[in-house]
Image (cartoon, grey):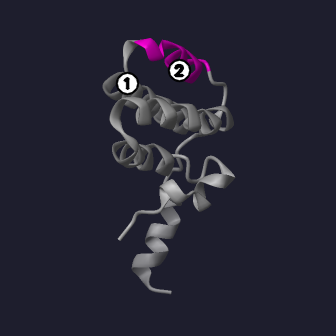
Amino acid sequence: MRIKNSFWNFLGPEPVESPEDALEKIRNAMLSVVRSSCRATDFHLEFKINYARDAGELWYLRSALMQALCDHQGETRAQTLMVGVTTLFVGQHPAAAGSKLNQRRP
């Protein structure tokens, strides 16, 4: 082992984001998309996102968010916006790693 590597190992691993911080990051991203890309009539979706208790609830609200985005922005734009949201779930929800929206197209 090199001295440099042992020094950095001594300092410990990089801090991992807490589940609460990750949840708020996801929630804020979803709310930002709703507020910037949907109409005021989608207040029920904003309410559900605000009061979701965990990443699992937010994960299942993605379909409602996608539908609202499709209605107001079109499917192509909706998919683009959802990629950013879905990537935030990696490490927070097991289904996120295999999500089709999480995979960028060539």
Q: Quadrant of residue 73?
A: top left
Using the image, determine if residue 6 lies above or below residue 66.
below
Label 2: which secondary element: helix
- Please tell me how crowded label 1 is: few (under 14), some (14-19), or many (20+) other residues with Cα within 10 Å: many
In the rendered image, residue 48 lying in the magenta stretch gets the answer: yes
Question: Residue placed at 61% from the left, 47% from the top?
Answer: 92
**Location of residue 58 in the rendering, given as x and y in whole percent from the top left corner:** 60, 33
* Residue located farthest toward the bottom when viewing the structure as drawn: 1
**Location of residue 94 in the rendering, given as x and y in whole percent from the top left corner:** 68, 53
Residue named by callout 1: 38
- Please tell me how crowded label 2 is: few (under 14), some (14-19), or many (20+) other residues with Cα within 10 Å: some
Locate the C terminus by quadrant: bottom left
What segment is highlighted magenta in the picture? 41-51
Give the residue type that dot 2 points to.
Answer: Leu
Label 1: which secondary element: loop
**Location of residue 67 in the rendering, given as x and y in whole percent from the top left corner:** 50, 34
Residue 45 circle label = 2
In the image, taking residue 36 as reference, residue 34 lies left or right, namely: right
Question: Residue placed at 38% from the left, 43% from the top?
Answer: 81
Q: Quadrant of residue 51?
A: top right
In the rendered image, residue 28 lying in the magenta stretch gets the answer: no
In the image, taking residue 99 as reference, residue 53 lies left or right, namely: right
Are the two marked residues, 1 and 2, in contact with CB atoms closer than 8 angstroms? yes
Question: Residue placed at 43% from the left, 50% from the top?
Answer: 83
- Give the CA distance from mark 1 to mark 2: 10 Å
